[in-house]
Amino acid sequence: MRNIVLLSGGLDSSTLLYRAVGSDPQNTLALFFYYGQKSVARERTAAKYIACSRGVTMEEVDLCSVFRFSKSTLLAHITAPITQVIKNGNNTVYRSEGTEVEFRNGVLLAATISLAMQKYPEDEATVYYGAIQTREPFPDCSIKFVEQFDALARLCSQGRIRVEAPFAEKGKDDVFKEALQLGVPVEKTWSCYESGEKPCGICPACLDRRILEGINC
């Protein structure tokens, strides 16, 4: 059985890699996708560290051309800020709009399924991606989405390839607890949408990680 993990270098995908690899790193492949995101350099560094820490081979796939027309503020060709800081008297509001990258998970999963069929034409393989429950119910992180892609993968591979998202019904706190249990180097992961030396602390990804008190992430 082959394991293929979509690894962004963030907490969720890093924990998923540690969970999926078990005691068999030789049969696990990590895929890192460059799709034009502003934070690619920090994400790549984190992903390489995580993959190396578990003895897993990592390959990078360039999908920038697919998203060249995207209006998402997460992408480098869009100059609009990811998060706006709005002062309202003594209150500060952080507003992030337009962050969705159109059908990103769908494109990443489709590319992974194709690669699995090419690289492992005779083997069974499981594709893992780290969808979790977030404050906003994104369709491409839902159980229904996972089930649909799993069905497509099985159909197109004669049942050899399947898609799983073990954290799809879990929140960030549950994933963090599992990360600690598995020994994931949480401080080496990167979730911020920005590309600075330190996390911005105000983008949606940073706000979701505020449960990690005492961890420099």
Image (tube, rainbow, N blue to C red):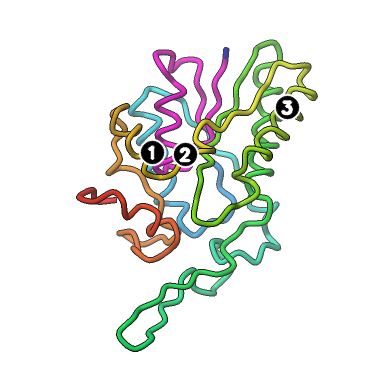
Q: Residues within 10 Å of mark 3 (few under 14, many from 20)?
A: many
Queried whether the magenta region covers residue 22, the answer comes back as yes
- Residue at (65% x, 35% y) in the render: 146
Q: Is residue 121 left or right of residue 8?
A: right
- Whether residues under marks 1 and 2 lie with C-beta atoms below 8 angstroms apart, the answer is yes
Query: Where is 97 relative to 8, above or below?
Result: below
Identify which amino acid the numbered label 1 is placed on: Asp
Q: Which residue is mark 3?
A: 153
Queried whether the magenta region covers residue 171, the answer comes back as no
Does dot 2 land on a helix, a strand or a loop?
Answer: loop
Examine the image and state in which quarter residue 71 appears.
bottom right
Does dot 3 land on a helix, a strand or a loop?
Answer: helix
Residue that protrudes farthest toward the left in the picture = 214
Query: Where is 67 relative to 144, above or below?
Result: below
Total labels: the figure holds 3
- Residue at (46% x, 25% y) in the render: 57
- Residue at (60% x, 64% y) in the render: 72
Q: Is residue 109 left or right of residue 210?
A: right
Q: Residues within 10 Å of mark 2 (few under 14, many from 20)?
A: few
Q: Answer with mark 3 or mark 2, whichever residue precedes in sequence.
A: 3
Q: Quadrant of the N terminus?
A: top right
Between the residue at mark 3 and the residue at mark 2, the CA separation in whole angstroms equals: 23 Å
Q: How far across and down, in percent of the image, does residue 131 sit?
A: 54, 41
Which of these two is toward me, 171 or 14? Answer: 171
Identify which amino acid the numbered label 3 is placed on: Ala
Between the residue at mark 1 and the residue at mark 2, the CA separation in whole angstroms equals: 6 Å
Give the residues in magenta: 2-30
| Image disc number at residue 170 | 2
Q: Which residue is mark 1?
A: 174
Q: How far across and down, in percent of the image, does residue 139 sit?
A: 65, 49
